[in-house]
Image (cartoon, grey):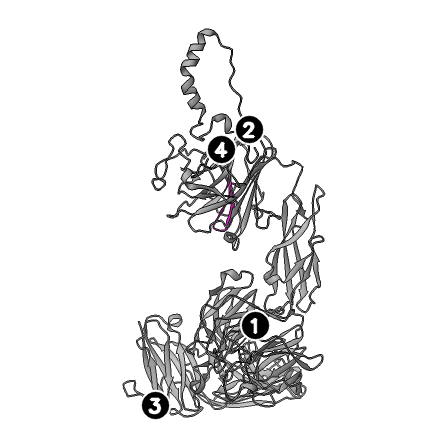
Amino acid sequence: MKLGSTFFYPSLSFHLPITWLLVVLIISGSFEAALAQCPPISTLPCGNVQVSLPVSLSFSSSVAGTITDKNGAGTGFTMVDAYSGTRLTQDGTPSNSSVPGYEAAQLTLGSGRLQILTNKGIAYLTNNNQINALGVKVDSRGLLRLETTLINPFNGTSSQQGGLWFGLGDKTFVKLSVSANKVELRRELNDLSSTVSGTSNPDQRITGTIANLNTMIVRLRLVVDPTANTAEGFYSTDGVSYVNVGAAYSPKTVSIAGMGLTASTAYGGIYATHRNATTAVTYSFEDFSISQPSAGNTAPVFSPASYSYSLQDDAAVGSLVGQVSASDANGDALSYSIVSGNTNGAFSINASTGQIRVAKTLNYHSQSSYSLVVRASDGGGLADNASTVINVANGTNTPDFSAISWGSAASEPYGTHEIHGAVVDGKLYIFGGYDILKRPSYWTPTKRSFVYDPATNSWSAIADLPHTPNGADFGGITHEGLATDGTDIYFAGGYKSNSTGTGQVFGTKQVFRYNVATNTYTALPNLPVELAAGQLQYLNGKLHYMGGANLSRADVAIHYALDLDNLPAGWKAMAPLSDPRNHPGSAVFEGKIYFIGGAHHQDAATVTQKTVEVYDPNTDTWTRVADMPIGLDHISSAVTVIGNRILVLGGETSHNVKSKRVLAYTPSTNTWVDLTPLPETKSAGVGVTLKGAIYYAGGNFSTLVRKGAPGAATTQQVATFTLINAETDQPIQTLTNGSTLNLATLPSRSLNIRANTNPSTVGSVVFALTGAQTKNVIESRAPYALFGDNNSGDYYGWTPATGSYTLKATPFTSTGGAGTAGTSLTVGFTVVDQAATTSTISENQTLSQVKLYPNPSKKSDVHLEVQNIGQHEKITLYLIDMSGHLLEVRQLTTDNNGNASTIFSVSKQLLAGIYLIQIQLPLGQIQRRLFVD
């Protein structure tokens, strides 16, 4: 039947005995009425229900002599399946009692589409009450291919579905449908169909969730093969390549043996239902066809069916990764494509040869493995898929170093402050911030941006930032989150200019991508709220914005993620930080995000933080690791990865108090050491690794650019001591000269002391402990622990006697304490065992120095503020439950005003109950009770 066909059937001609003629004349009226319909499946004569092949409906105009829509337009279908069960009350009473499954009012033909407004009924197991299962009757004894196109199929959670069906009725059929952004092939025989979950189900073939399927044009193809006694389902979202719905199953097909579908005739068509939902939805079909493809056409086949390749992340763009290959029994030319797993377009494939090449700069830390699905398609729309795993190794693994030789590089064009930058393709790009041309008149962001080329040691201007508002001499951004995927650079949030260019606004939702290759900017989906002074990182194809402050400059713990392969989905909320901080730094290392330092409050109220949290995208969780040796903020773009370590350059220890320290964190040992400091104090600049060197550019309105060459120190050294909990093998605190260790308040009495060396591995370390107890030991393998370990980081325990101690550790270049001695470290410390000091101040006394609020806490964050203690004094906080168990230890340092503060995330840390907070001050101890409802 072709679109627009008119149905013809021959007039009746009989040679009857004359005595029969009267009978025929008498019954002719009712006979003609019966011929006018074919109940219970059609309003057409029964002779018009079966059609010749091929069938092709485009729904572009009315087809005479077919099932009509609500406006009387012919849909092209010749029948509507009759339900064998009981019609659902929600679907009302039949409008045509002769054809009860037909509701014309729910059908609309127009604009090249047939729309079905769904009913609740369905044909599934014994739920035989589907409405408007439209179809045609065909000779089913040959190979058949049924096809339809769905426009933006509804994505629901109540089994709403629409698609193709082929069968004898609502008890025996196969259907291929879209539901909940999945495509399902299912067979049913005499109301029986397996409900087993997983790939062992013989009656079902179903895909996983297909992202954004509800926003696509989805083509469905159902192939019924009487020779093989199989039904096979396919779908396509590009109209060229088709995916087998049963790709994850063996076999990919379902059996139709014994169903009777191919014995003589059967019905095929389209259907839709909203099933378990209470509200009808509309499914739009663009076409429908049944054809008889050549029985000789077979799908391509990959051999092997899976591939695995490895390369280093310093492989140049365009480098060959490997080649996949499929064969086609019909000799058809094949087209190769990557259909999934190609995060952020990291790889390309040659459509003709199957060669896979690097398309974007790779980074082992941001993604070390890719699982691609590669497809080979023939000219007939059949295809096969192959899994292709690409593992990425670290190609620039700089050895640990203990010294940096600092020099200078070409100065920036302007003195800058609060700038941000990133390295792409061997060049340093810096953006916005404040520059000297706008100071001191206004604290207004600049839109000027530049690129530094180390090959020529020169700076060049690049396109101005696009942020709005802007004008001839204002615009741009500062305090933004900035990240790179190795190819392009991304900006999110930040302080933008006000509308006149005479000030700044403390937050924006704006997000942009700087396209390095074209020197242009592209707007991306906005952040959900105005944010600034946080961090942005790229990990596994997603941008993560974390922390910072809101438009009111209040610290926030928020965490949003944007999938660069699914921009229409926008930013999604992820696990928040446990400790909200502004002006932090961050880095991506081996698949995790390290959120480092930052501050509570801002300007004169700033209290810098040592806290380091690590985000694991596999579990969507944050974990605390070893604190920095000091609290630092204004390190937003001054954290960089080099080799096996994360470096933090400069920063501020309190408001406007800059630092020159360079701190190195080793994730594998969870330790911090100091490296050669910057030649001058620095903050709010850009610190990066570029061509094997360390650069620090700008900050504090300086044009100076420092360039550091990593190298070995003239001598080895013991940099710090760490007190270890031998029960958990986790660090408790840095052991410094003059420390007092109170066994009653430590998390464990089973202790050890680790020497942290620079470099991290030396020949050996010689320990000498004197005082209340003595011990002399030589450790020749890291970790270097006073009381030893099993050489795998499982520390042996020591419960010290109370009293005074002196500990000295000396590194040597050879094992066993042989070779050249390096720089030793000596500390004195005291061990006590007391639950409280004699100078404890009663909780009932008036304590204007301590504020704890809200208290009681109804599962909200609790703020602790200590005031008027003295400048730069060390304070230790002990959080203890009423059974005496130590839950947490925190160390704070007061600012220039003698104040310090911290936040306890009650909702994540504490159950309802009463807790004791002991505050160890220089002159004694304060105790406060915390009530959690």
Q: Are marks 1 and 2 in contact (CB under 8 Å)?
A: no
* SS for dot 4: loop
* SS for dot 1: strand
Q: Are marks 4 and 2 in contact (CB under 8 Å)?
A: no
Q: Amino acid at mark 3?
A: Thr
Disc nearer the start of the sequence (4/3): 4
Q: Nearer the viewer, mark 2 or mark 3?
A: 2
Q: Is residue 178 magenta?
A: yes
* SS for dot 3: loop
Q: Are marks 4 and 3 in contact (CB under 8 Å)?
A: no
Q: Nearer the viewer, residue 251 or 54?
A: 54
Q: Quadrant of residue 589?
A: bottom right
Rounded to the nearest angstrom, the CA distance separating label 1 from label 4 is 60 Å
Disc nearer the start of the sequence (3/1): 1
Q: Which mark is residue 263?
A: 2
Check disc 4: other Cα within 10 Å, few if <14, some if 14-19, many if 20+.
many
Q: Position of residue 248 (x, y in %)?
A: 57, 48
Disc nearer the start of the sequence (2/3): 2
Disc nearer the start of the sequence (1/4): 4
Check disc 1: other Cα within 10 Å, few if <14, some if 14-19, many if 20+.
many
Disc nearer the start of the sequence (4/2): 4
* SS for dot 2: loop
Q: Give the dominant element type of the magenta stretch: helix, strand or loop.
A: strand
Q: Nearer the viewer, mark 1 or mark 4?
A: 4
Q: Nearer the viewer, residue 465 or 86?
A: 465
Q: Which residues are magenta?
A: 175-186
The residue that label 1 is drawn on is 483
- What residue is at 35 percent from the left and 39 percent from the top? 92
Rounded to the nearest angstrom, the CA distance separating label 1 from label 2 is 63 Å
